[in-house]
Structures are given as structure tokens and as C-alpha cells.
Amino acid sequence: NMFLFPEKNSFGLDISDLSLRLIQIRKNVNKYSIISYNEMPLPKNVFENGEIKNIEFLSESIKKLVSTAKGKRIECNHVITVLPEAKTFIKLIRVYVDNEESLPFILGQELTKHIPFSIDEIYFDWQIMGAFKPRDENNVLIGAAPIETVNSYIQAIKNSGFIPLALEIESCAITRSLIPMHEALKEDNSAKIIIDMGATRTGLIVYDKNAVQFTMSLPVSGNEITQRISEKLKLDYKKAENAKILCGLHEEKCSGALKKILMENVNNLVNKIQEAIYFYEESSGKNNAIKKIILSGGGSQLIGLDTILNEKFKGTALGSIGL
């Protein structure tokens, strides 16, 4: 969303459980360039599954992240950031609407059927897919997040001296970043799955018809994989992390030891992907089969993961993008 605002007056802030990242982009003629960037680790006690536990420390960290940015000095005070996938809800729904004025009320009623919150406990927003059709059914992409979660992110940013312009749902930001950049998918209208593998959690996104269809959390993360290696091989955490990076799931590296240890995690991941494919294709009437899987996030660079997934999903084209 930073492209929707004057780039000289805002910067992007990625907030995750274990790190902060900053980027500012400037347009020069028809080309966008990164002019400022930074990254900073966060200790484990600042967040817990997307919830801020130490707002003062987070605010001070944001200040430091901005003041020590590489490249050009950050001179603006407007921020665009994301809300954690674990605390947000997004879904494409179909609703009958008489007119656009009645849409907020109708969507508010419809939301309560899909999420475990009452309407007074959430913020929500929406986007009509295509041209609005009065007195007819419309496809609407709707997103929601708990008021308490959103307010804590806003307060942390304000306490650091900045003004939040937009708080995005993470899956929307991920798909917009990946899909246009992946040349092989530009002219392909088939449904896609994006697996975003992070240090503390992994999300699955089904993307079809130019919209996020639904998201779900997966039972695997970079830290869990490292912890399993540490326990099975009796290594300290740092050595286990190094082993994961060097050996991964390769058949020959480390004598294939890590592949044997980690196949339970991989099979759990495969089963969840299969469930998502089955659910989407059944619920959509098999109108648009899922034909591509895109890997993103640091965990996607686990050596051999793309090969194993390609073997498990024979006939499915597999693209891999490591960010």
C-alpha cells in the first residue's frame, strides 16, 4: 500500500515476532528504487503469537530502527505496516446487496457467521471485486482484526513518534509483493497457494481470481525445525540452526540425517497443504484447480524443501521464491 501514498512522505515497516524491518521506496520516472532500509532483531519477550507484550520496548526499537536506517535518512513520519496473520481474518464472500450504502451493515452481519468475534470487538474493511451490481449478489473481499490488537499496534507506532497511515493484513501484502514479480504467473489465471514460512509461524494463502480467497496457519516454523534438530542431535540451538542452513533436507549432506529427522514436520506440512487444496477445490466447485505452489519467507530456503514438495505434489508446477 505504500504505492498508494506519496512515497516521499511514508515508509514501510514490517513488524514480526522476532524482528523489525524498514524500507522506503522512491519513484524515478517509471522505476521504483529502494532508498532507505534497515533490519533489527527483537528479543522473544516483546511479542507472543502476534500480540504485543512489551509496547514500550517495541516503540523504542522502532525509533532506533528509523534513526539508524541505511541509505537516505528517513525524514517523513508516516508509516505503513502490517497486522499479524495469526490475529487477522480475510475471506472472499458473496452477498446480496440492494445498494452500496447498505453494504457496511450487511457485511457486519455476515462477518459474525465467519469469525469468533462480535461486531463491536473488531475493525473491518472491504473491497468490492469488480463493478458493483445493485440489487444483486456481489463478491466482496472482507478483512477484520480485533480492536485490541489493532489499537496496540497503533499505540506502539504513535509512541515511537510516527503516524500510522495504513495497517494491512499480512496475506494481502505478501500476495501483492509476490504475484506481480513472478513473471511465470502473470498471464496464468489458475489458482495458487503461497506458503509463507517464518521463524515463529507459517501461513498458507489461497490466491485466485486476483484476490486472497482464504488463509490458514500451518503446523511448522523455522524455530520449531531448529528446536527439533537440537533435541534429536543433542546440539545447542545455534549449532542446530547452522546445521539446518548447511544440510537442510538434502539426501547426501550430513549423510541425510536431517532429512530423516525432519520428515515428520514435512509430512505435516504436506497434509495441511493437501487439506487446503481439497477444501478450496470442493468449495469452489472445482472451477479453478490449484496448479501452483509458491514458497516465500526465510524458512522456504531450507535446502531440498522445494524438491520434496514437488515430489509429493506430482503434476503440480512448483515455484520457489525465497525472501
Image (cartoon, rainbow, N blue to C red):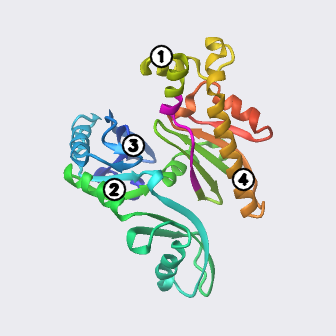
Residue hosting label 1: 235
Amino acid found under the numbered disc labelled 2? Pro
Res 190 label: 4
Crowd tier of the residue under label 1, counting other residues whose Cα lies within 10 Å: few below 14, some 14–19, many 20 or above: some
Relative to residue 195, is residue 234 drawn left or right?
A: left
Amino acid found under the numbered disc labelled 3? Ser
Crowd tier of the residue under label 3, counting other residues whose Cα lies within 10 Å: few below 14, some 14–19, many 20 or above: many
User: Which one is earlier in the sequence, the residue at label 3 or at label 2?
Assistant: 2
Marks 3, 2: nearer the viewer: 3
Cβ atoms at labels 2 and 1 below 8 Å apart: no
Residue 16, position as x, y percentages in the image? 39, 43
Res 16 label: 3
Residue at left 57%, top 88%?
Answer: 98
Residue hosting label 2: 6
User: Which one is earlier in the sequence, the residue at label 1 or at label 4?
Assistant: 4
Q: Estimate the spatial distance between the alpha carbons at disc 3 and disc 1, rounded to whole Å.
A: 27 Å
Marks 1, 4: nearer the viewer: 1
Crowd tier of the residue under label 2, counting other residues whose Cα lies within 10 Å: few below 14, some 14–19, many 20 or above: few
Crowd tier of the residue under label 4, counting other residues whose Cα lies within 10 Å: few below 14, some 14–19, many 20 or above: some
Q: From which residue to which does the magenta span run?
A: 215-225
